Every structure is written in structure tokens, then in C-alpha cells.
Amino acid sequence: MIGVRNVVNVQSSLKALRRRIKLGSSNVNDSCKEQSQHPGSRPPPPLNVVLSEWKREYIREDQSSLPPQEVLQTVDDWKRFLEKKTSSSNDFTQQGLPQQQQMFDNEVTLSQRPDAKSYMYILEAATASVKLNFSECPLTAVEFADNLLLRLLEDAKTDYHIQPTSTAFLVVCKAWANVADRNNSTLSSFKIEQWIQRLQILQEEGWPGLESPNIVFWNILLNAWSKEGNITKIEETLQRMIQDDILGVSPDTVSFSTLLDAYSRVGTSDAASNADSLLHQMLELYQSGVNSAKPNVVSFTSVMQCHVKQGNMESVHSWLQKLEELYEQTRDEDLKPDVAVYNTCLSAFVQARNPKRAHEFLRSSFTLEVPPNERSYNLVLSAWAKEGNPYQAEATLQEMHDLYANGVLETKPTVVSYNTVLSAYAKLAANTRSRRPKGKDDNDDAPWKRAENILQHMESLSAMGDDSVAPNERTWNIVMDVCAKSGRADIAEKLLERILSTTGSKSVPSIRTWNAMLSACMHAADLRRAKRLWARMQEDATVHPDIVSYNTYLNCYVRASMERQTGRRGKHGISKQEEELAVEALIRQIQDDPIVAPNRITYLAQINFWISRDDPGRAELVLAAMVDQVRASTKRGEHRNKDHQHPVVPPDRDLFHKVMAAWIPLDLPKKAEALLLTMSDLEERHGFKLRPNFETYNIVLECWAKSRRIDSGERAEAILREMEALSTSGDKDVRPTIISYNRVLNAWANSRNPTAVTRTDSLILEMILKQDSNTMPNAVSYNTWIKTIALSNDIDKPKRAKDVLKMMKIHDFRPSNDLLKKIQDLLRLSNGKR
């Protein structure tokens, strides 16, 4: 055999083949004669040696290696050339070619002739899963291999040299399994089933070199079904194997594990129950002598993962105990608990948000024989972070440091560990922002202070040579996020300056970094700083604002406007009119940006901005623009914008509700009612999903109740009757609630209408007679009734108050002391007292 690495040059060898094909195809006899004149010349390396080395280079991702399609074409052309040359050489031999030369030619021809192994090299290269930079998608590579095997089976009928073996079938089946679960397709399992059936038929027909499909083939099929989520097929096939319904195939550990893994992928309660049953069945079969059903630690881990997704810690712990007991009894290395199974238990505690038990388990269950790894501690850190307890997370991180320093732990904290702790401080900052006293966040335990100290500690360790904890982009962004949620935009900007000033820093500001900075400005209502940062970001050629950038900057204006509205001293930097012009310009910039498209948050920010300025009319224009875009896209036949690049965003019910509620303080109930009619029209005539519900009607009722118009009671009650009619006809989403009735009662009270007391009496009685727990009068109802009497011009208010007391007694309602006092005030009027 010729030495591969020292002798064979793949590229030159393949090029030589193509050159010989090109030269020889024009005049084969001349080519043969030219070769015969050099009987001592060294023959080229055998074709399979060249193809073997090419496969290695191709899988190794050598940029100069040819793709399988070109190599196949070269091999096919060479095969045809050799066949033509053999035919011509026979003619040439008859003309008197020396016998020595004939032997030389025959030797070269045999060593260069493509055979089954030649095509196997091409099949294996095309389907190699490690080939990451393949110019075509993996599915196309599998289809190429599939078609090649089909062709070889057809060619093998006339050429016994290229008859495929069972290995070729196995390679193609594995390739299909590797690309399973693409686009929710069942193509992979269908193809694998076809090849298994084809192999079985050919083997029965007596094709040489073919063996009947064994358990390896069936496990590949099971794996494809698992990826496609077809658990039923796996269950049925596995039971057939157990019952010997598939000739010559018995399930092994891989077969059972595939089904267990499929159950863990689903993660439902039924899947967990089925996984329990299957593992029990495996244990019973193994104990009865079926060695192929022997479970291993992976089997137990898969079942435990099913229960992790259900948050069932007790079942997870129960299976761990069972595994530990089996290992103690058998000392079987396949059943020895490993760090993965213990980490699965830790995941259960994280899922159940029980960091205390996770930490206790970490300290008690791991041993010197099975020590915890970095993931073990990171899971505990994650559990503390999810609970929003960064101080315990930081203490656990210090514990990890100490154990590593003392040689107890082999793995030390990395940047992932630190980032998890920092994330916990970000969550704490978000949770405490609303209740943080002004000026009380500068102590050493303040989240932003702790985050900044941790960042400095990471930088110090990195400077001393520990690259594993060097702050990365995520680290900086999290710390800036902590500052943002703490309202410390000034500290966040200092961090940004440090990033920008660090020469050769790996933490060059990304779009996420800029977004974190804008978020800090938004939380601090610091519009002046946000404007300055936005201008700087526009100058940064390495980033382009995404929709998060635009939305966050837009919300900076919203927050500043809200601060101005409430009379707080915000850091605006521009006048109210300039803010409006700036927002309009920003909206135009979003619309003109070809890379981004406005989303629901964009429209919500616009609506919030105009509402904060007591201008719901402008907010309505935003809704109208959204409606127009959807209508225009519908006419084009696709729900995309005019450039056909981004999907349009239809207005939803919540956006309408927000604008409707904005009319409440302006005492314009007809505006809110008009929006209600618009929603109904868009739902019925144009297909928008905007059907009004009880919340929609309740907002309109609130508008009428607070408008204090003389007709507000009548109008509110008419809307209530409309809700009842729609509910009776089948629209349960508009069924009136106690809130609906109370708002109608309040509308009557505020109307000062002469009939208000009488109408209120009737409504209360109606609510009681309905005997509906959802609309039975409550404290608000009775308080509003008393309010109506008190505000009325009724000359017999004491009698009305007594009627209220009687109704409470009939209703078996116990009034509060405050309500009793209001009733007593009305009763005193009978004695002429106040």
C-alpha cells in the first residue's frame, strides 16, 4: 500500500484524473501508445487511497477540498474513461503490444477502477455531521447521499464491483436521522423505514454483502421518531421488539433510552408517568434475565428529567434513591450515580424555586467520589437568582471560591458564575425600584453598589491572570442594567465610558450595551442624558439601532412627559413643544429605517406619550394609522408593510382600552363610546380581532359615571342593558359583573338626576333578585346607594335610609362601621339634626 500522507496529494491526484480523462477521451489509442513508451514509469496512487485522503481532508474542513458532487462527477467520468480505454486497449494489444506492457496496463486499470469502497468514501464524506461549513444545507447533503445509494443499487445490477454493503444503508439512515425534526416533517423517519424495508428485501433476494437490518438500524429509526415527536411509533415498535414480533431484533439499552429521552423532551405529566412505567419494565426484564433491557444511569437521568419539567421534586429524589440503592447492591459501574444525575436533582429544586433545598442537596449529596462541578454550583446560583436573593447567591459564590482554594473543588467560578450573581442583583433592583426611598440607595448593600464591586473584583482577578472570570460583554451589560433599574444612569454612563476608553477591550459596546444605557436613562426619567447618548450611538459605526433601541429611547420621552405631568422635576432639557416635535421625528426615523419595523411596544409608547399629555385624540390617530396599515396590507394579499419586508402590527383590544380610559379624566364619555363602536365595526366588517368584552364596556361605563352629566345615568344603564342582551344571545365575554352594576349606580349618583334615587332602588332590588353571586350588591353598591340619596333633593332622606337598612337585612349584608355612620347621618335628618 502506498503511504497516504507522504505520497498522495489529493488535489493533484484528482486533477491528474481529470487531465487524463480530457487528454485520453480525444484519442484513446494515442494515450495508450504514449504510456507504453514509458514501461518503467511509476503508476499513480490507487483511486481509493486518493479518495480516502480526500474524505479526511473534507471532514477536517480543508478549504481546498472539493465538494462531494464534484468528486462524484470526476469518479464517474474516470470510470467511463477506463471502460472506453479497456475496450481500445484490447484492440491495441491485438496489434502487437508487448506482454509486459499489457500486464502493466491491467495493474493500473485494476488499482484505479472505482468500486463499492470508492463510493462509500463519497457517501461518508457527504453525510459527515462534523462538516459545518458545507456550502449546501445538511438536508441537501442527505438527499445527495440518498440519491447516490439509489443509483448504486441500480448500477450494481450490471457491475458487480460497486455492489453496496449494509454499511452504505446504515450511513444513509444515520444521515436522515441527523436531520430529523426539520420543519415538523416526518420525511426522515419515512426515508429510514423505506431503506430498512429495501435492505430486508434485497437480503432475502440473496444480494451478496447484505445483512438483515439489525437493532442498530431500528435504533436509528427510533431516534428519528423521537426527534419528530412521534412517541406512539416508538412505543409500538419497542413493544413489538420485546414480544419478538420483529424477526432477529431485540431491544437494547439504546432502544429503551431513546423512548425515555423522547418522554423527557415532551415533559408532560403523562410522559413522566409513562417514563416511570417504562423504567420499571426495564428493571423487571433485566431482573428476569433479559440483559439487553438493562438500565443505566442515563436511563434514570431521563426519567428524572421528566419530573423536573413537572416540578415534582419528590419523584426526582425517589428515583435518585432507587439508583443509589441499586448501585450499592450491585456495584455495577453502569448504575453508578454521576455528576449529571445529581445536577438533574439540582435542576428540580431550581424549577421548584427552592434554592435552600438546592443548596442543602449540594452540600450533602455530592461526595469525594462524585464531586460537584461548575454547573452544580451555577444551578444553585441560578436558584438564588430566580428567588431574587443575590446576597445568598454571592455567599454561595464565595463558598465555591473557598472550596477551590482549599483543593476540595476541582472547578472554580467562571464568568458564567459571576454573571448569574449579577443577574440576581438586577432582579432585586427591579423588584425594589418602586418602593425604594428617595436617596436611600447609596449604602454598600445597594444592588448597583454590589454589582459594581463584583465587576471590579472580576477585573482584579483577570488582571492577575485568571482569564476564566474576565468580564465579557454580558457582564458589562448586566451591571449597566442593575444601574438602570436602580435609577443610576450616571453610574451606568461611567461604565460606558470605561468600555469606550479601554484599548483593545473585548467589551466593545454592542447594541445591547447601548440599549442598557438607554434603559438606565428611561428609568431615571433622564431625557437630557438619553438625547446625548442617542447622538453618540448614531456616531458609532459598529452598531445600528434595533427596534429595542428605538422603543427604549421613545419611552425615555414617555417617562419624561409623565414626570412633567405629575409635577416632578424631571431632567428634560427641552420644552414640552420640543418634546412633541422630537417624538414625531423619532417615529419618522423608525418608519424610514429599512432594517427595523415598529412593533406593538412602539405603538404603545406613542399612545402613552400622547395620553401623558392629555391628548387622547392624538393617541386615537395612532390606532387609526395601525388600522390603515392592516387594511392596505390585506388588499395586497399579505400582512406586511408597503416594502413587503416586515409584518404589520394590528391594534389589539388593550391598546383601544388604554385610549378609551384616557377620555375618563377629560369628561368626554361619547369619545370612549365612539371607540367602542369602532371596535365592533372593525370586528364585524373588517375581520379585526377586537370584539369588545366586559372590560371594554366597563371602561365606557366609568367614563359616563365620572362625567357628572345629567344624562349619564340613563346612558350608563342603556349600555348595561346592551351588555345583558349580548350576553343572553351567547356572547359570554360581555356578561355584566358587579363592577358594571356599581359603575351604573355611580353614574346615577353623580348625575343629580331627579329620578336617580328611584332608579338606584330598582337596580339594587334587581341585583338581589337575580341571585347571581357575580352581581350581588357589595359594600361599594350600598355606599353608592347612600351617596345617591345624600346628593338628591329628596325631602324624605331618612325614609330612604331606612329602606337601605331593610334591603341589607333582606340581603343578609353586614355593613361596615363607616357605612353605618353614613346611614345614621341620614336618619338624624328626621330630628332636624346634622
Image: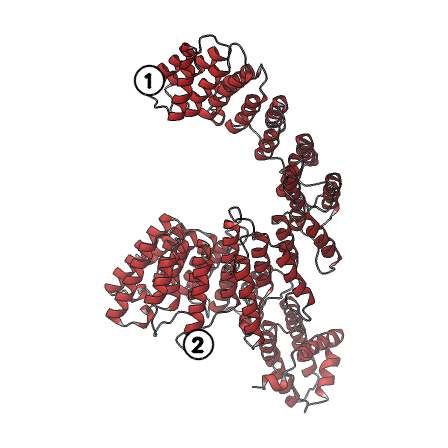
Residue 148 image position (x, y, % from top left): 58, 63
**Three-letter code for the amino acid on which mark 1 is drawn:** Lys
Farthest residue toward the bottom? 40
Q: Residues within 10 Å of mark 1 (few under 14, many from 20)?
A: few
**Three-letter code for the amino acid on which mark 2 is drawn:** Ala
Numbered label tally: 2
Residue 783 image position (x, y, % from top left): 44, 22
Depth order, front residue of 272/169: 272
Farthest residue toward the top? 795
Residue 727 image position (x, y, % from top left): 47, 22
- Determine the secondary structure under disc 2: helix
Q: Quadrant of residue 480?
A: bottom right
x 58%, y 56%: residue: 483
Q: Which residue is tagged 1?
A: 809
Depth order, front residue of 650/829: 829
Image-based side of 345 in relation to 685, left or right: left
Depth order, front residue of 138/436: 436
x 53%, y 51%: residue: 430
- Determine the secondary structure under disc 1: helix
Q: Which residue is tagged 2?
A: 405
Q: Quadrant of residue 603?
A: top right
Tell me if residue 633 comes above or below residue 409 in the rendering: above
User: Can residue 294 be spotted in the picture?
Assistant: yes
Quarter the C terminus occupies? top left
Q: CA distance from mark 2 to mark 1?
A: 75 Å
Residue 719 image position (x, y, % from top left): 54, 19
